[in-house]
Amino acid sequence: MIQIALLLFGDSFVRSRAKYVMFIGCLWGMLGLAIFIDGLSGVTYFPLHSFGAFLLLESLVTLAIASSGIGTQKALLYFKGGVFCVVALLILSNKSSSNLLLAILFGFAYFIIGLFIIFAAWIVRFAQWKMAVLHGLGHIAFALFMMNPYPTHYKATVSLYLGTLILSSGINTAKFAWRIMTCRAGMSVFELLMPQDRLYCCDSAPQCPQDNDGALLPQTNAPLIIHIWTPVGTASASTLRRPVINRYIAAVDTQGIISMGHAAVELSSDIYISLYPVDDIDRSPSAFLNVLRATPDNDVPGRFQPDYAQEALEWCDSDRKIYFYEYNRQALMRFWNSYQRNTTYNLTYRNCSSTVAYALEAALDGVLARQHQNGVAILKTLMMPELWIAAQMRKRALSMAWTPGLVMDYANALRNIIHPVSKPWYQRLHSWVRAEPRAKKTL
């Protein structure tokens, strides 16, 4: 979540505050370690009741504003608010049975996440998949530790879980700050976030112009359009009803043909980014698992479509269009000049969706730099629910593969951060309490 926020704030903002980010990350990690040790000691000094009351308040706020979300955003906010509310009530009850239930709940969640990470890494075999497997095994080990039938004190469950979460977050923040402090001059935040094997010849690309404060200049002449062809919308026949799978992975029609959808980026007549294999990949159920692997033997020749009009003529119009009116044209062109030099296509590692996701991140590099020159504006952005949603979408995609559904929800969340609704979340909460009708939202 912090990484996405730093991407939007831009290179100048991040470099000037890298030492502060490092300090905050180290301090945050030390706090997490202290909370974890506090739980292990058997004498919990951590204010559980105060934390439970704060968590309950946060869950009620999330549930109150969830109705103003769109599609998956609404479902995610309801899920987050509901889980937080249950956890808060269990913490506040402070009974041995509730503490045992929390240990089982946290342990089971970590166990499932660990299995998912291992399964995704084993199936997809993306770069550094072995490290991902170790990461998943660490989740399972922690889950077994949380569900240990002979724990030191079940009342320390929250301290152990929260301490681990904060410690991990602090370490990641400090590592990212260190990368910023040690990277070469002129390297953007986007280049730090993106896997380096996706870029080619970045040093030879033209540098982005900057304003007097060193912030990248966003361009607002024409809208940046994210085109999404959903799996259901591109199926040649009626599809089987599988809501989550159809949205985020693939849709299977009544003839057994798998449709995965497509994604593209359009910027007037200047840029159109749409990567597609030269020859269609066999997507029958018998061959589908084999082509999911992100190994070099599954690399095939790809091609970039010339423009949206020709692609729509040869295939069909996109189902969804997401518009951005503030973006960094120069950063996007720099990415495109580098990325288009390699036309390799890989179904899970270098596909149309990953191309669009990274192009969008390049276009949003530093787009909020000039609007966030004070602490209040920064805090408002960090507290936006859409930032949490964007982070969850990106995390799930990086753990397996980018798909059109994930790109669609990721782009929607980022758009709501760049172009927020007329009322911020706390004003929407006030309107909800007064039972005022809400305005219909559009993409």
Image (cartoon, helix red, strand yellow):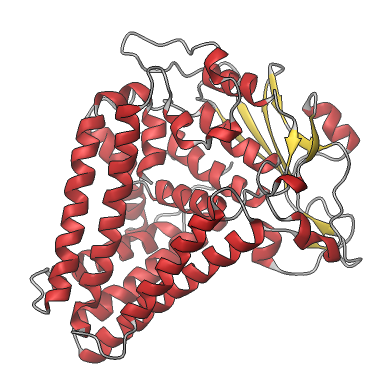
Q: x, y (%) of residue 247?
A: 67, 58
Residue 100, compared with residue 440, is above or below; it is below
Residue 303, compared with residue 246, is above or below; it is above
| Residue at image coords 33%, 21% | 12
Q: Is residue 220 visible?
A: no
Answer with the quarter of the image where residue 443 lies: top right
Answer with the quarter of the image where residue 104 lies: bottom left
Q: x, y (%) of residue 198?
A: 60, 34
Q: Is residue 308 left or right of residue 55?
A: right
Q: How many marks?
A: 0
Q: x, y (%) of residue 128?
A: 53, 50
Q: x, y (%) of residue 322?
A: 62, 37
Judge by depth and name the residue closer to the eye, 213 or 318: 213
| Residue at image coords 70%, 54% | 293
Q: Is residue 26 left or right of residue 185?
A: left
Judge by depth and name the residue closer to the eye, 351 or 320: 351
| Residue at image coords 28%, 87% | 100
Q: Is residue 28 visible?
A: yes
